[in-house]
Amino acid sequence: MLRSSVEPGVVLPGASRRSLWPWRIEPRPDPERIGLYRISAVLLGLAVSLAVAPLFTSTPPAEFYSAIWLGTFGSTLGMSNVLTIAMPLILAGLAASIPYRLGLWNVGIDGQMLMGAWTATAVAFAMPQAPGFLMIPCMMLAGMIGGALWIIIPTFARIVLGVSEVITTFLLNFVAVAWVAYWCTGPWYPKSSAGGVRAEPLPAQGELGKLDIQGVVVSWGILIAIALPFVFWAAFRFTRWGYEITMIGDNHRAGRYAGMNVRRLLVTSMLLGGLLAGFGGTIYMMGTSGQLSTGLTNNTGFNGLVIAVLAGSNELAVLALALIYSLLLAGGGSLGIVGVDSDLVFAIIGITLIFGSFGEAYARLRLVRTKSSRVPPESTTKEAPWTINSSH
Amino acid sequence: MDYQFLALTIATAIGISTAILLAATGELLVEKVGVYNIALEGVMLVGALTGFITGQTTGSWVLGLVAGGVAGCVFALVFGFITVLLRTDMIVVGVALILVALGTTQTIGSSYVAVEAVAKIPNADIPGLSSLPFIGTALFQQTWVTYIAAVLPFLVAFLLFRTRHGLNMRAIGENPNAADTAGIAVVGWRLFYVGVGGVFAGVGGAYITLGIVDSWAGNVTAGQGWIAFAIVFFAGWQPLWILIGAYFFGALSVLGDVGQVMGWGIPSEAFTVLPYVGTVAVMMLRAWSQKRRGAVSWPAALGLPFYRS
């Protein structure tokens, strides 16, 4: 809202019509194969950043790469790690991907995971004598509810008041961390404290059993995590709900004309995002440390968001990218053995993502010469159809 | 609680708010032209490390702050180049750059961990005012950076609402197509202010390592960039509310510690949480009241890529 509008015809200071740079970036009229460009650029970025990374360390490249290899495919422990990391990451990817289909950003996945895990822990502590076959489903259900509840306020603020869900979902992460920290240091303070902000361990029957596939040990939560992307992939193709979401994601107005309840679909996709995140936090807790802690998610939510955007509304791509991402995180984690700060892997991931952005920009934009153009440039008054709706 | 203790508490709250205040003021300028730099946390980290290393090598905190500002500017311009010029998604690029900043600063800065800063920013008592009872201790025994940071929102308010330049900035943030028609180089202005915001955040980051914690550690900013980002929303894009918001956030984080020392029996997490809950609540209240009046407080083109139509 402007207090005084700019009058037409007034030459404003600082304005220069004649640009020194005789080129102009404009959208391609018919962008094609955006996903292909993006994925190729991501793979290229991965190769480049992995090749350059040893230069930033004092470790010989051979040791550097062998550490990454041993931390991933090179050992059963490495593979166990990869799958364990993948478990919450796949769910976080889905938790971001489903709202993203409607142009909604779920930036609060870390908080929803923590709140899911907190609710599940509360349920487990409320029924400490219950047998495992009763406790585990109750905890999972509680985790889903906790995660979904944590996204209700941002959903309400977005749908009813029009407040950007980007900032509200994000800020609630901090609240969730503080909430969990309070319970871990206060009411659930462990009797034998062993460093870090961790709660009293869960009752033993509340932990998920382990699968052992030729030495690769991982909790059976991974089976659910791998199955869910297929379930949603099918749901978006073969159910009415999925069809409506896909259709509205392409064009809100068309869906409304077709008689769809857009608001209801926005709400369900947001709540589903929170639910999946809460479930992810819960099974990760139940399948690994078996105790609630503030460090439980370790930015899994952000990584999931990134995966969802790169995957571009395709649940199977979410699964594939989450697995690749887990390989990177597990490989990076093993760098500590050769004396490299394991946070270097964040830089590798970040640079890979930036390459992905370049690839996408290349697919969507072109450079046009502005001088001496005999043919007038094509009109692009229509709003670009791929403009992500990040309005508030 | 005696008066001396209260005065010192206020002084600490103002002191530790400085970095957040600087970064938030810069971010306001960026958002007024329609861009949100989500990578603020990363920009501050880069500024923090560069400022610290420069301070250690040259022994001068002034050069440290300058270097932090320059590094922040360069890093923010990377963000600006990718999002403003190439029209890619600000959230993805922001998250990516935060990861890059986190990874590279940890790796490069590993030899500087747990080293005490040689060039600490000294306190500069304002003659006369600093010897006033209570107020002197609370307000006028700060560093120069803190005084300047406290004045900046007023200058920004003047720039935005009292000058032609500021009118152009707001035009770009509200309606870039109209601004473009009026002859304003939208992309150039946006890039320029992303760079300016980077300078502010970079100096803020350097202030953390040279003026607040006096050392470098991995992820030393510890979410201050995110808080600065939130304050801009909390302030409803009003410069003077940025000042209030930053001091409010600073005061709450100090109150958590004070509460533990004094044994108030309130968990310190309650104070940690208040700013975030407060921001969400303020945004919702503001949206609710504006919905009835049919106006919004954020720049209408915030976060939308600009294509000439």
Image: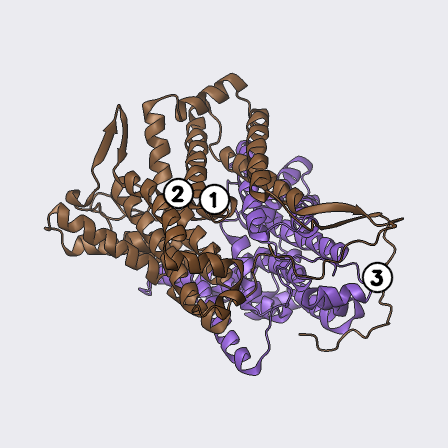
Q: CA distance from mark 2 to mark 3?
A: 48 Å
Which residue is drawn at the image coordinates 54% and 70% (left, top)? B134
Secondary structure found at label 3: loop
- In this view, the residue in front, A365 or A162, is A365
At which x and y percent is residue A346?
51, 38
Secondary structure found at label 2: helix
Which residue is drawn at the image coordinates 42% and 56% (left, top)? A173
Kindly identify which chain the residue marked by label 2 belongs to: A
**Left or right: residue A155 compared with residue A284:** right
Q: Quarter of the image for the N terminus of chain B: give it.
A: bottom left
- In this view, the residue in front, A383 or A356, is A383
Q: Which one is in front in this view, the residue at disc 2 or the one at disc 3?
A: 2
Residue receiving disc 1? A307
Residue receiving disc 3? A14
Q: CA distance from mark 1 to mark 2?
A: 9 Å
The disc, 1 or 2, on the residue closer to the chain's N-terminal end is 2
Amino acid type, callout 1: Ile
Q: CA distance from mark 1 to mark 3?
A: 41 Å
Discs 1, 2: same chain: yes
Which residue is drawn at the image coordinates 60% and 72% (left, top)? B297
Color of chain B here? purple
Instruction: Give the letter of the brown chain.
Output: A
At which x and y percent is residue B166?
75, 68
